[in-house]
């Protein structure tokens, strides 16, 4: 069944957003939205032990404080991206900000596990609407040479959000309790709602009547949620467990049904003819592989610092800060120049190679040499590799679709990255546990080396894949 709607142009604010000062004020608002999404992820992770102790949660319940957000966020990104194109990116950004703030308040006031997990679900839905809508508006507002600069600032905000979460989380929990790590994001959400109408264009294109593909939306959302859920279960249950197999089978079945629906629908959620573009198809593959190699790094390193180097959790958090700060500085200062000089295709290939080198350093440096030798150089290489590959991958995907599908491109990039992150983390952790032998569910030095080496292999595979479109572009 489809629902008819009319897209609006939002011309009342479009002119203001396209003045020089208006565009950079709009960028500040859009970047702050991405900052909040990244901040919330890292800052909540720091607070998990305090939440578990205060609410007396079981280990499975505390896991769902994280997974509830990941599933709702990753599962709805593609749907939200397409909705931004049909209903208007600004409307979706405002709605996402309201939902995010509501979920934040629900989680902050939680006195039980169901309320906390419910708040995290609402937060994830809000973030899923917020992130692709903000990216779509950025892509529509900035073009040409200024787009690389704007995208680099976006990437820097992601890195800074992660660093700020790690640093601020412990301070806030110690001074004001775990609820404060949620409440700190509310002012930014309120500012986004208040200022969006003044600073941002609507983002919808044209005035034609469109139909929203609810059947396609339901099937693809279910497919992504089932896939991510299966990936999250690998570390706990193993690849061969009935739960994981059932999740992957459900995902494949729903994905096949989605393709069938899209081929028959007059106005599909995801126009399949877009994938006639080799650049788009390859870009989505790069987002999956790159997401696996990038996201898994930080989880593996956090475990490595505490299990292999026997650091306390607070020390491990501080040891991760240089990565985020280096990524922020590189994204802000050098990335725009590199993208302008090499183009996004060659930039992402270089970034994936640097990322692989960082993984190999972490895999082979002797733990006895300590943090400064065994870890820090690898972390700095990883930070540069992440910055140099993440933003250009999004630019490649966005550049392969028309401007009427910028929201969809943002949703595709985000969803593919989230799926890759879940699959990569689960796979590399399982490889590490298997290589550790009788240590059971923990990773020994051999296990970490195997996991980092596997991540390097995936990064290099992605680099080879990226070189195919880099050569074609040249």
Image (tube, helix red, strand yellow):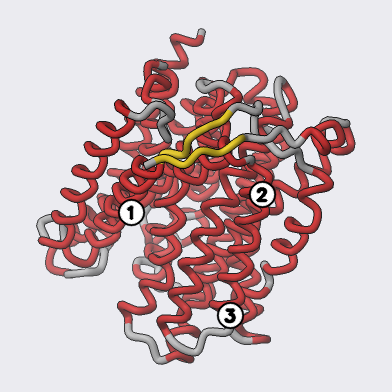
Front: mark 2 or 3: 3
Looking at the picture, tell me which residue is in the foreground, 174 or 105: 105
Q: Is there any visible trace of residue 363 in the rendered image?
A: no
Distance between mark 2 and mark 3 Cα atoms: 24 Å
Q: Which residue is mark 3?
A: 108
Closer to the chain start, of discs 3 and 1, is 3
**x then y, percent, for residue 286:** 40, 31
Q: Is there any visible trace of residue 275 in the rendered image?
A: yes
152 displayed left or right of 420: right
Mark 1 touching mark 2, by CB under 8 A? no
| Dot 1 alpha-carbon crowd within 10 angstroms: few under 14, some 14 to 19, many 20 or more | many
Distance between mark 1 and mark 2 Cα atoms: 27 Å
Q: Which residue is mark 2?
A: 157
Distance between mark 3 and mark 1 Cα atoms: 25 Å
Q: Is residue 433 above or below residue 469?
A: below
193 displayed left or right of 418: right
| Dot 3 alpha-carbon crowd within 10 angstroms: few under 14, some 14 to 19, many 20 or more | some
Front: mark 1 or 2: 1
Q: Secondary structure at mark 2?
A: helix
| Badge number at residue 225 | 1
Closer to the chain start, of discs 2 and 3, is 3
Q: Residue at x 59, y 63 (%)?
A: 99
């Amino acid at each position: 069944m489809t629902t008819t709607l009319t897209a609006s142009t939002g011309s009342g604010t479009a002119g203001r957003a396209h003045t020089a000062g208006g565009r950079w004020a709009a960028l500040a608002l859009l970047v702050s939205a991405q900052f909040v999404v990244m901040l919330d992820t890292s800052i909540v992770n720091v607070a998990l032990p305090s939440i578990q102790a205060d609410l007396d949660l079981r280990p499975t319940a505390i896991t769902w404080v994280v997974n509830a957000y990941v599933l709702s966020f990753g599962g709805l990104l593609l749907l939200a991206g397409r909705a931004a194109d049909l209903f208007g990116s600004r409307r979706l950004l405002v709605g996402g900000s309201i939902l995010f703030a509501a979920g934040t308040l629900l989680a902050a006031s939680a006195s039980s596990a169901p309320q906390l997990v419910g708040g995290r679900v609402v937060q994830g839905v809000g973030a899923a609407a917020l992130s692709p809508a903000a990216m779509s508006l950025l892509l529509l507002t900035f073009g040409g040479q200024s787009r690389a600069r704007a995208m680099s600032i976006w990437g820097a905000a992601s890195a800074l959000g992660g660093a700020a979460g790690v640093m601020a989380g412990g301070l806030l929990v110690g001074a004001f309790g775990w609820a404060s790590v949620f409440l700190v994001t509310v002012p930014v959400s309120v500012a986004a709602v208040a200022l969006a109408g003044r600073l941002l264009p609507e983002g919808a294109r044209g005035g034609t009547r469109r139909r929203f593909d609810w059947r396609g939306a339901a099937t693809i959302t279910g497919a992504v949620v089932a896939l991510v859920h299966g990936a999250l279960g690998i570390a706990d249950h193993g690849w061969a467990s009935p739960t994981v197999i059932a999740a992957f089978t459900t995902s494949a079945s729903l994905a096949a049904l989605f393709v069938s629906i899209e081929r028959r629908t007059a106005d599909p959620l995801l126009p399949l003819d877009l994938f006639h573009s080799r650049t788009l198809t390859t870009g989505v593959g790069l987002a999956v592989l790159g997401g696996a190699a990038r996201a898994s790094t930080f989880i593996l390193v956090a475990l490595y610092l505490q299990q292999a180097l026997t650091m306390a959790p607070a020390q491990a958090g501080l040891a991760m800060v240089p990565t985020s700060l280096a990524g922020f500085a590189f994204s802000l200062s050098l990335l725009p120049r590199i993208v302008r000089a090499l183009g996004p295709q060659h930039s992402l290939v270089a970034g994936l190679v640097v990322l692989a080198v960082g993984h190999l350093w972490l895999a082979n440096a002797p733990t006895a040499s300590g943090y400064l030798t065994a870890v820090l150089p690898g972390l700095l290489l990883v930070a540069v590799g992440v910055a140099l590959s993440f933003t250009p991958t999004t630019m490649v995907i966005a550049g392969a679709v028309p401007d009427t599908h910028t929201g969809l491109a943002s949703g595709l990039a985000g969803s593919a990255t989230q799926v890759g992150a879940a699959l990569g983390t689960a796979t590399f952790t399982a490889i590490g546990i298997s290589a550790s032998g009788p240590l059971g569910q923990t990773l020994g030095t051999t296990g970490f080396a195997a996991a980092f080496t596997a991540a390097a292999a995936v990064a290099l595979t992605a680099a080879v894949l990226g070189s195919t479109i880099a050569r074609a572009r040249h």
